[in-house]
Amino acid sequence: MRPVRVLVAAVAAAAALAPSVASADTPASPVTQHVTHRGYDVTVPASWRVVDLVERPAACLIFDTPTVYLGPAGTQQDCPAHAGPGTYGLWIRSQGSTRAPVGARILDRGAAVSVRPDAGGERHVVVRDAGVLVSSFGGVRAAEVLRSAHLTAEARRAPAPSHAERASGSAQQAVARVKVPGRFTGRGFDACTAPGGNVMSAWRKSSNFRSVGVYIGGVSRACAQPRLTADWVRKRVAGGWHPLPIWVGLQAPCERDRFGHTMSNDPGTARAQGRQAAGAAADRAQNLAIGKRSVLYYDIEGYNNANTTCRRAVLNFLSGWTNQLHRRDYRSGVYSSISSGISDLSDTFNNDRFTPPNHIWAAWWNGERNVDFKPYVPDGKWSGRQRVHQYRGGHNETHGGRTLNIDSNYMRVN
């Protein structure tokens, strides 16, 4: 029997909205569908895409459109380098030997859960009666569909969790942490999803890349991170890599047509939202063995900074981000377009109303491997090993027989 079943359920009420000239035999358009995996059944909008990862092992777990992914992630996902802030969706897979993410709720009976996601827009649930791990991404809109979940006759109870596994879902485990990015001058790359250890080893031996940008969370993160764990981070640092942790949360309020999650226009509210994002990012960093005094970079995509209300909201949000990270004993970084976010931060560098980040990461695809940001940023600002330059956008590179789609960076950091 196939482990995956998708049934489309038409809602009768939709027929009443059909034009009066429609034939009585015209079927109503489906508005929902049931997606079932290992006896765990959830109802989602009919417009959501459903991807069977067993049939498509190279598929990237990317939420560029609302999607339900079913099954284990492939070992070599075909992901873009930089997916813009994503939308929402679910990932349902067998728990097997996979350790539940920190903060996951473990259910011994039943399938429905409350809709409240964490501050990064995610919700993780282990459903013992079906032996599945269910993750929602993109905030409340995705998490709320978990309220519809129920178990079918196909559900098979998994073995009882060990004491260590239960603890991993309810409390933060003690881990040896590392400080990132560390002192480094040279080339790096970022990819939508953290590459596997064998890929990272091949690139370490066959290329001059030594830094890797990795998306650790945020309500607008486009790609899931099936390989990203504290162990992944520690091994990369031990192997000579310099990770750049990236948080992708609320975007500029004037870009609501582009992004599903945007910050408030009100400066005070935006600043509070920045503090909240920083707190969530610090929590996630600690869970990933990223220790104090590390730099956490906020991804604010390009925006219309000619809109003064929008510009003020972004600057207040990023000030809240920086201030709260400092309270948590982390350093702050901001990734943005050279002509919007980075330019605005430079213009207000000495403005007492705003707190500048410790590091800047400029997206400026001019092909130049340097950290010269003139005329947008003069040499006297962020001049003490505090700059990253994304000089080339998404493209394929192959090293050691392993191909990735990456953005290229040059940096001088510490």
Image (cartoon, rainbow, N blue to C red):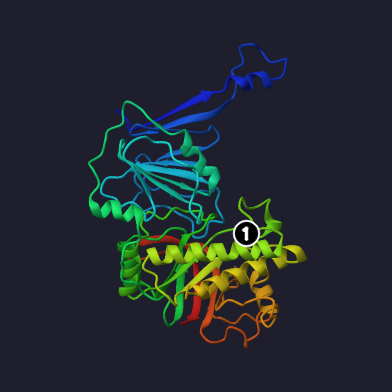
Residue 240 in the image, given as x and y percentages of width and height: 34, 76
Q: Is residue 293 left or right of residue 276?
A: left
Residue 93, compared with residue 17, is above or below; it is below
The residue depicted at 50 percent of the width and 65 percent of the height is 279
* 135 up-or-down from 347: above or below: above
Quarter location, residue 160: top left
Left or right? Give the position of 266 relative to 318: right
To which quarter of the image does residue 234 belong? bottom left
Visible residue check, residue 376? no
Q: The residue tagged with tag 1: helix, strand or loop? A: loop
In terms of depth relative to the viewer, which is nearer, 362 or 360? 360
Q: At x 71% / y 59%, what residue is drawn?
A: 265
Residue in the foreground of this view, choosing between 18 and 199: 18
The percent coordinates of residue 169 (x first, y second) are 34, 52
What residue is shown with label 1?
251
Front one among 85 and 311: 311
Label count reads 1
Image location of residue 195, percent across then percent down: 38, 60
Q: Is residue 309 left or right of residue 62?
A: right
In this view, the residue farthest toward the top is: 24
Residue 95 visible in this rendered orientation of the protein: yes
Q: Quadrant of the N terminus?
A: top left
Question: What's the residue type where badge 1 is placed?
Answer: Gln
Residue at 31%, 36% in the rendered image: 130
Q: Nearer the viewer, residue 63 or 112?
A: 112
Q: Quadrant of residue 30?
A: top right
Residue 187, above or below 20: below
Density class for disc 1 (Cα within 10 Å; few <14, some 14-19, many ≥20) is: many
Left or right, 313 with reference to 384: right
Residue 190 in the image, given as x and y percentages of width and height: 47, 66
